[in-house]
Amino acid sequence: MKRYNVAVVGATGAVGEELFRILDEMDFPIGNLLPLASARSVGTNIEFAGKEYPVIELTETVFEENDVDIAFFSAGGDISAKYAKYAVEGGAVVIDNTSHFRMDPAIPLVVPEVNPEDIALWRESGIIANPNCSTIQMVQALKPLDDLYGIERVDVSTYQATSGAGKKGMEELVMQMQDFFAFRLDESKIEAFAHQIALNVIPQVDKAMPSGFTKEEEKMVYETQKILHKNIQVAATCVRVPVLRSHSESITVTFGEHIDVDVERCREAIENFENVKVIDDLPNSLYPMPIIATDTDFTYVGRLRKDIYKSNVLHFFNVADQIRVGAATNAVRIGLKWIKLEGEKC
Ligand code: A2P
């Protein structure tokens, strides 16, 4: 089997660290592995498959010098904006985890279970974009429902974990809880979020936009439409909650006027969809929760129910580990699909 030289940009970050775990678990056909980060991290090592690899400084020439075939970028939009082109010029396909390229019409935005065919568009730019974490887990549940009945509108509220803001987000929640138990919460640092996150919920993820929505909420609208190739109406409210890991979503789907939702058929369609599991037994208090999804590669769906008033409306709840399913696992799955569809031709 052909092997590929793989670079991970942002190797020391929350998503980068998870990428190494998943590349190993999924037996990614790696030739050389190149962990890249800022000059601050040079001198540290990362562990991969029982071996230590030194972290190398990200530079313009590092991709070409090391003959990189596949470059995963998870170091923030500004880094992708500056360095992705050097990876492409150096001969690599870039799988980008940031929002920087997502809405560029020439760049495919891919959830491999939903729109794998879009990967072919990578040839135009050398780049494949990984969607926003909240979008990924939502479209995985929407796709089978759209295939079944045709979706017209989605209303979603998210409950997003602090790790969505990287390691500093997780650390801030933990520090604030420690400060709470030490009776000094009022002195605690507030840096990663606009407000204290411990014992609180914050109805703002990302910056305010002129529409009155946040950037995160707008991402859920436009990314969903791009991935499903459909002008579905989406209204999102994104909320940060004091959870360390795994995002939850409360989703209401409206189908065409003439549809009379059969919940059992919806459940079956979701259950049969790749990498999605249904946990839905309310009388026994069984449903998806962050503690179930964390450290797994599945999106969990439950609380499926038909609206009391409108027969064409379905409600449900879904949860996924947003660092894995919503970022690292999706990126590695894109890489594996790219190898299967395109890489072997290169
Ligand atoms: P470093 O640790 O050297 O700063 P997170 O999302 O968890 O905050 O992680 C961000 C990742 O992006 C880290 O691996 C970080 O590396 C990397 N990064 C940040 N700034 C740069 C930069 N200027 N050049 C290369 N990597 C960077």
Image (cartoon, rainbow, N blue to C red):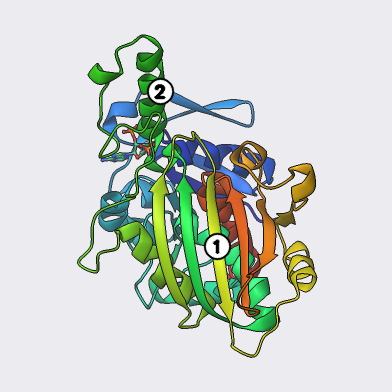
Crowding at dot 2, Cα within 10 Å, few <14 / some 14-19 / many 20+, comes out as few
Judge left or right: residue 57 versus residue 23.
left
Above or below 268: residue 45: above
> Which circle marks residue 44 in the picture?
2
Query: Residue at the location (25% across, 24% down)?
Result: 189
**Secondary structure type for disc 2:** loop
Q: Where in the figure is residue 254, as x and y percent of width and height?
A: 56, 77
The relative height of residue 251 versus residue 290 in the rendered view (above or below) is below
- In the rendered image, which residue does mark 1 sit on? 251
- Picture quarter with the N terminus: bottom right
Label 1, ligand 1: CB separation under 8 Å: no
The percent position of residue 237, horizontal first and vertical second, equals: 40, 58
Q: Residue furthest top?
A: 182
Whether residue 90 is visible to the viewer of this picture, yes or no, is no
Q: Is residue 164 left or right of residue 304?
A: left
What is the total number of numbered labels drawn onto the structure image? 2
The residue drawn where x is 65% and y is 49% is 29
Q: Secondary structure at mark 1?
A: strand
Q: Is residue 80 left or right of residue 314?
A: left
Residue at the image point whose x is 50% and y is 83% from the top: 230
Q: Amino acid at mark 1?
A: Ile
Horizontal and vertical percent for residue 234?
A: 44, 72
Q: Which mark is residue 24?
A: none
Q: Is mark 2 within 8 Å of ligand 1?
A: no
Report the residue at 44% width, 34% height from top. Answer: 242
> Mark 2 to mark 1: distance in Å?
42 Å
- The answer to whether any part of residue 150 appears in the image is yes
The furthest residue to the front: 309
Q: Quadrant of ligand 1?
A: top left
User: Toward which corner of the image does residue 164 lie, by quadrant?
Assistant: top left
Q: What type is the residue that disc 2 sits on?
A: Thr
